[in-house]
Image (spheres, coloured by chain):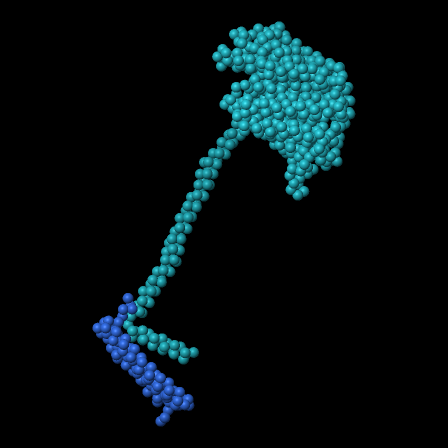
Chain colours: A cyan, B blue
């Protein structure tokens, strides 16, 4: 067996073992078993790094190892499962293992003293296992199963503090919203499976390159798969669950709802890009672009530190999806990787801040104040220097400032969008979405930094008890903020303005297999041409956003209040998240509940009362009738009458038995006479 | 004058008288006597048929057997009558109707 497959088997199954040990025995183990999960994920990380180094040494863009076995065989109907390992898999495995390890370490202190400490680690392990399944799968079936397992662990971890009603609700909301997407996903899988009779990527790719499925059906299959990605990657209009998912513990938010799980949708789109038809891709691009702008507009007015980051995640995922739609799917994957590092770091930073706030409020016996509300913060800069610096670095990365990783990936996405729009001028809205979202991203991220760390404290009595978090929590911050620098993605080159490096060297775009799609080379050419204008524009836009945030929240030359008044309409929409939840509630949930109510009325009051009970009544009558027939007719008429007639006959015949000897002789004589007479007649 | 019918007629009259006695007499001894008459009518028939049927003497021999059997029958019947009398203090056959119950 190939060494890569062997490693990936270990990477895959170690967290599963840790899950089983912790869920059943965790509470009895020393330290409640956290070292088992941490050990498993550390081993995974070590193996991932080994694979990564192996990949770097071979430096082969076409590297591809595949291994599968028949899982289900029913005659001609076969389902094969297996692993596919190429450069995308290896990079993604490393991202998952790294962020997961950071979350495990961060949680040691963050979750300390929680009554369900060991269960938390069990769930984290379960998630790592499921996510690796998505990454390693070489077929749609294992992908779908892992997809659902990821949804399950997400549900378990969002609702981890299920004693809190809002957390339990958020878990259910996340699960149900994902189900909506999963239905589309499943339809997409079934369309491909019925067309090719196989769930293996390789078979499906080959079938499509031979034109086995094309036109509308292929577009439909692509849209179906994309709906799954919309659910998981929280794209409009299925984005509603992600902000609520912030009810979960912060390490969970960082691991799942920022870096890895929500990226699963993007990862799937990247994997399946070659079979997406151009029509499906246009829809993908518009959904992504719209989500990017839409979510960043909402993020501008949010005051909960985690909600800002949540909407920011939605927006960044929108960027990636849009990039897949425009054909620059390698840029999308690049952004996925860079985003995983800096967004996870931002979440850990916010966790660190919330942790400090929580302790300070706890000391003051203040249980009213929301520890996540940025309006209660301010001036934390000197109290939490490591958190501040690492968050600032990640903010610069997400904003797209040169020298940082986000600049490279975001620039690649914007260049792809710009090139797409210049080739197809009717899609001029896409770059507007992209650059608009980039502007707002810069604005709200610096608003977050200024409101949290700068200015004078809003609650001076709290500031004395705000302390830097322990080293278990700052270690991930330092490591991940380091990874926000461009240099880790461009080695061995050191040009901060070009993404040229190992990443683009190893991961190269593949031409779509669908006839009529632009070739990978054409797309790359287009991106290359749009590179410079996109870069200049994105720097201008980022600078503008930072400047706006600076003048409104740091220098106070522009009052946020007067701005809010000037753009009252937009401000109101943004503050209320465009009333999406209310619209769903009004136009989807309420009508459904009302219909359900009506139907239940019909069921209980009409169907049950008249039809079901009516049948009961009819049966009752019928049985009474049958009973009568049976008793009066059969029993009395036939059974009893047989007895009675025998009785009566007996009485009659009895009178013949006179007991007198001579009568009997007389009868015998009559008998003889009768016989004689009969014989003579004959 | 020597016709079979004459014998048969006598035999039939004797049989009817015997039967009449068996049916109508209440006295058990009289009933027994009726039975004897019937047996003797049969004897007449045996002998008559033997003679007119050309069957040598088998009819006569059979009649002798009947007479012997009738003697035995009379002994058994008289024993029954004595038992009847012991049980009912009467030899009226109508009294002996216990089987009816």
Residue A527 shows in the view: yes
Can residue A572 be seen at all in this image of the molecule? no
- The picture places residue A522, in percent across and down from the top left corner, at 77, 25
Quarter occupied by the C terminus of chain A: bottom left
Residue that extends furthest to the front in the rendered view of this protein:
A30
> In the orientation shown, which residue stands out farthest toward the left?
B89
Q: Please, is residue A182 above or below residue A383 in the view?
A: below
Q: Quadrant of the N terminus of chain A?
A: top right
Residue at the image point whose x is 68% and y is 13% from the top: A542
Q: Is residue A155 left or right of residue A417?
A: left
Side of A234 relative to A632 (left or right): right
> How many circles with numbers are drawn on the protein?
0
Q: Position of residue B56 (x, y in %)?
A: 41, 90
| Residue depicted at x 63% and y 32% | A144
Q: Is residue A378 left or right of residue A632?
A: right
In the image, residue A567 lies at what x, y percent? Answer: 60, 13
The front one of A102 and A254 is: A102
A515 over A411 or under it: above or below = below
Front residue of A248 and A400: A248
Q: Residue furthest bottom?
A: B1
């Amino acid at each position: 067996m190939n060494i890569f497959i062997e490693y990936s088997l270990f990477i895959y199954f170690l967290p599963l073992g840790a899950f089983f040990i912790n869920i059943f025995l965790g509470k009895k183990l020393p330290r409640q078993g956290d070292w088992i999960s941490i050990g498993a994920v550390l081993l995974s990380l070590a193996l991932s790094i080994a694979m990564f180094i192996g990949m770097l040494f071979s430096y082969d863009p076409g590297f591809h190892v595949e291994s599968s076995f028949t899982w289900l065989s029913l005659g001609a109907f076969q389902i094969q499962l297996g692993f596919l390992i190429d450069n995308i898999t290896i990079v993604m495995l490393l991202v998952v293992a790294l962020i997961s390890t950071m979350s495990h370490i961060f949680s040691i202190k963050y979750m300390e003293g929680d009554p369900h400490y060991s269960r938390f680690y069990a769930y984290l392990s379960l998630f790592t296992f499921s996510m690796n399944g998505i990454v390693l799968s070489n077929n749609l079936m294992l992908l779908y199963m892992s997809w659902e397992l990821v949804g399950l662990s997400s549900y378990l971890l969002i609702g981890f503090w299920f004693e809190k009603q809002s957390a339990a609700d958020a878990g259910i909301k996340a699960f149900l919203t994902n189900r909506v997407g999963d239905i589309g996903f499943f339809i997409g899988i079934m369309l491909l499976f019925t067309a090719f009779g196989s769930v293996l990527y390789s078979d499906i790719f080959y079938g499509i390159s031979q034109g086995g499925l094309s036109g509308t059906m292929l577009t439909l299959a692509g849209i179906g798969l994309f709906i799954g990605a919309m659910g998981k990657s929280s794209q409009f209009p299925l984005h509603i669950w992600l902000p609520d998912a912030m009810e979960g513990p912060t390490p969970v938010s960082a691991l799942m709802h920022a870096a890895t799980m929500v990226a699963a949708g993007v990862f799937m789109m990247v994997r399946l890009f070659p079979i997406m038809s151009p029509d499906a891709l246009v829809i993908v691009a518009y959904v992504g672009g719209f989500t990017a702008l839409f979510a960043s507009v909402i993020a501008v007015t949010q005051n909960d530190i985690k909600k800002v980051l949540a909407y920011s995640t939605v927006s960044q995922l929108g960027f990636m999806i849009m990039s897949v739609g425009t054909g620059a799917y390698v840029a999308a994957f690049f952004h996925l990787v860079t985003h995983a590092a800096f967004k996870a770091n931002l979440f850990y930073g916010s966790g660190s801040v919330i942790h400090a706030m929580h302790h300070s409020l706890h000391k003051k016996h203040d249980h009213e104040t929301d520890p996540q509300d940025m309006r209660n913060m301010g001036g934390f800069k000197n109290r939490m220097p490591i958190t501040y610096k690492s968050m600032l670095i990640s903010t610069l990365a997400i904003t797209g400032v040169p020298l940082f990783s986000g600049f490279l990936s975001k620039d690649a996405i914007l260049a792809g969008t710009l090139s797409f729009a210049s080739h197809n001028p009717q899609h001029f809205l896409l770059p507007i979405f992209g650059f608009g979202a980039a502007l707002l991203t810069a604005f709200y991220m610096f608003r977050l930094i200024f409101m949290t760390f700068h200015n004078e404290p809003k609650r001076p009595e709290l500031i004395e008890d705000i302390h830097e978090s322990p080293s278990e929590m700052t270690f991930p911050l330092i490591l991940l903020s380091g990874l926000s620098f461009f240099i880790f993605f461009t080695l061995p080159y050191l040009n901060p303005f070009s993404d040229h490096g190992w990443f683009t060297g190893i991961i190269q775009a593949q031409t779509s297999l669908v006839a009529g799609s632009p070739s990978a080379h054409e797309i790359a050419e287009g991106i290359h041409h749009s590179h410079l204008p996109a870069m200049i524009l994105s720097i201008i836009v980022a600078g503008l956003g930072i400047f706006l945030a600076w003048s409104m929240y740091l220098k106070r030359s522009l009052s946020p209040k007067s701005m809010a008044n000037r753009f009252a309409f937009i401000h109101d929409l943004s503050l209320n998240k465009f009333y999406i939840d209310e619209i769903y509630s009004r136009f989807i949930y309420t009508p459904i509940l009302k219909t359900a109510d009506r139907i239940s009325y019909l069921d209980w009051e009409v169907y049950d009362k008249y039809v079901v009970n009516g049948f009961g009544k009819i049966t009752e009558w019928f049985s009474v009738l049958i009973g009568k027939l049976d008793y009066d007719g059969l029993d009395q008429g036939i059974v009893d009458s047989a007895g009675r007639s025998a009785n009566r006959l007996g009485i009659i015949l009895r009178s013949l038995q006179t007991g007198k000897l001579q009568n009997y002789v007389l009868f015998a004589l009559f008998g003889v006479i009768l016989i004689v007479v009969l014989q003579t007649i004959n | 004058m020597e016709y079979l019918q004459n014998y048969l007629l006598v035999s039939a009259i004797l049989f009817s008288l015997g039967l009449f006695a068996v049916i109508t007499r209440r006295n058990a001894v009289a009933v027994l006597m009726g039975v004897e008459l019937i047996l003797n009518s049969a004897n007449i028939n045996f002998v008559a048929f033997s003679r007119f049927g050309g069957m040598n003497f088998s009819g006569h021999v059979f009649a002798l057997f009947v007479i012997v059997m009738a003697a035995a029958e009379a002994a058994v019947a008289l024993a029954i009558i004595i038992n009847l009398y012991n049980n009912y203090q009467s030899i009226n056959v109508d009294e002996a109707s216990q089987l009816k119950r």
